Amino acid sequence: MYWITIRTTNLRWEAELMQQVLAAHDIPSRILDIGIMSYLGAGSPAALQVRSPDQWTALLLLSSPEEEQAGQSDKSDYS
């Protein structure tokens, strides 16, 4: 079974939070450090991976609601 990177972030704690959301839905995931370890609380880049059969479910769980995305595009038109 293959692992697929679905998100990368500059802060490991964000990846850990996303991992907790996936764990709540029984989706196995793992975090890979992809940069220099944190120094003085600055954080470290990380990648969140899931198994290939869970890719689309995980992406849907971690995505923003469609209404929120539509509302953001409407606001940018009037700025």
Image (tube, rainbow, N blue to C red):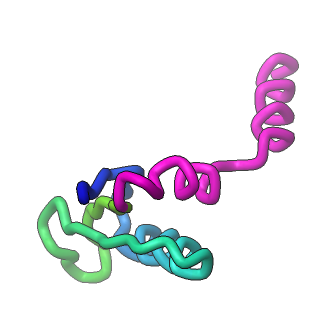
- Highlighted range, magenta: 51-79
The vertical placement of 60 against 50, above or below, is above
Query: Quadrant where the N terminus lies?
Result: bottom left
Task: Depth check: give the residue in front, 57 or 18.
Answer: 57
The structure residue drawn at horizontal position 84% and vertical position 29%, both measured from the top left corner, is 75
Residue 13 drawn at (x, y percent): 42, 76
**Residue found at the far left of this picture:** 36
* Residue toward you, 32 or 71: 32
Answer with left or right where residue 25 lies relative to residue 8.
right
Residue 2's image quarter? bottom left
Considering the whole magenta stretch, tell me its main secondary structure.
helix
**Residue in the image at 32% along x and 52% along y:** 5
The answer to whether residue 74 is left or right of residue 32 is right
Residue 18: x %, y % from top left: 51, 69
Say which residue appears at 77% left-offset and 24% top-offset.
76
Residue 40 forms part of the magenta stretch: no
